[in-house]
Image (cartoon, rainbow, N blue to C red):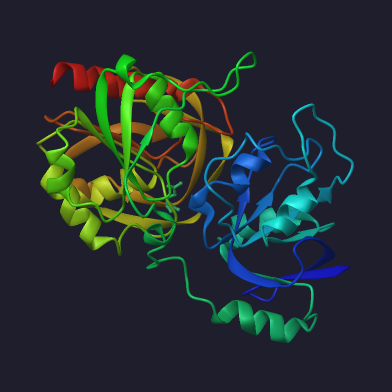
Amino acid sequence: MKAVLALADGRIFEGKSFGAPGESTGEVVFNTAMSGYQEVLTDPSYKGQMVTMTYTQIGNTGVNPEDVESRGLFLSGFIVREYMECYSNWRATMSLDAYLKENGVVGIHGIDTRALTRHLRDKGSQNGIISTSDFNHESLVAKARAIPSMAGLDLASEVSCDKPYHWTEGLWDLAGGYPQVDPASLKYKVVAYDFGIKYNILRCLVDAGCDVTVVPATFKAEDALAMNPDGIFLSNGPGDPEPLVMVQEELRKLIGKKPIFGICLGHQLLGLALGGKTMKLPFGNHGSNLPVMDMATRKVEITAQNHGFAVDLDSLGDAACLGHENLNDQTVEGIRHCSLPIFSVQHHPEASPGPHDSQYLFSRFVELMEKNR
Ligand SMILES: NC(=O)CC[C@H](N)C(=O)O
């Protein structure tokens, strides 16, 4: 079946349908990870976006029930060069096409994803539409133009959990899969704010010795403090951090009370709570091969990233200093409070998918909690 991708600026890509048929809109972004498409698909931070993979063949390893980063698929479209229906992997239980159909995600394959990526890189991320029913270019472009910009959108509250829950699953290994860890062996009580949290963050926290209670995005600071945690964690999530004003207000009440660690949207919200500003990047960083420097050690790590917004360092004044720097575009990759045990990173130390270079950050959080007990 035919499918068409139309961008708001009028660029058209004609290809074939895979996954669910229908029509879907979102901000089109490119991801440069060479593997891990299932983790990309289940990352809630992609809500409201359509993802194109720069890697050429997608689907080869099928889909399995274990490599999921959340309870579902939140992205609005998936765009690939060559979809491989014939999959092979000992863990696979179904094809990618069947998985996308089952989850209602519209896909398109057989298009020139290199041209699409270069276009987005030169012109910036923009809204688009994939359709398997309307092939009229003008009508499609008009529909793509009608959808709201990602800037200003509060999407985190749509993917957060409804009520608090306890997490005890540790990191996967070949011999035993995902272990259930005895909470009695976990030394540090952590309240993790869920703005669209990825499971592997929770697993990394457990692996570092944290007894984690996940709470909704709207959870009040006083309720978090009443749980007497050793530390507060702020998760990744979709959309623009700026409209989450209530969350920023609650975070302000936590600053100075407990050690805090934030990742991605959590990092951006922390920047805003500290009085800084965030901005939209032209096309952001989405991939698992992005170089970052830890300013404390001046070591370079290769990181997983998925973001379209960034913290503006100058706007923070003396409230925080640069903790990590992105070596590709020199954007703020992390901040560190000058006197309090508070830090955050824009990238993803939990990887999934991606390298594990940054996993030390979970130990850094634990060290802060140990010192401040
Ligand atoms: N992965 C994330 O947490 C993304 C944060 C935010 N939605 C951004 O695009 O920058």
The image shows residue 368 at horizontal and vertical percentages of 21, 21
Q: Is residue 255 visible?
A: no
User: In terms of depth relative to the viewer, which is nearer, 240 or 7?
Assistant: 240
> Which quadrant is home to the N terminus?
bottom right
Hey, which quadrant is residue 77 in on the image?
A: bottom right
Residue toward you, 36 or 73: 73
Q: For the point 50% across and 40% down, which residue is it? A: 305
Placement of 54 over or under 22, stated as above or below: above
* Count of numbered marks: 0
Q: Is residue 362 left or right of residue 61?
A: left
* Residue 109, picture quadrant: bottom right
Judging depth in this view, the residue of 108 and 159 nearest the camera is 159
Instruction: Tell me the quarter of the image containing the C terminus.
Output: top left
Q: Kindly identify the residue that appears in the image at 61 percent across and 70 percent down.
A: 25
87 relative position to 346: left or right = right
Residue at point 42%, 32% (across, down): 202
Q: For residue 236, say whether it is visible.
A: yes
**Residue 194 coordinates in the image, percent (x, y):** 36, 47
Identify which residue is drawn at 65% across, 70% down: 24
Q: Position of residue 43 (x, y in %)?
A: 54, 46
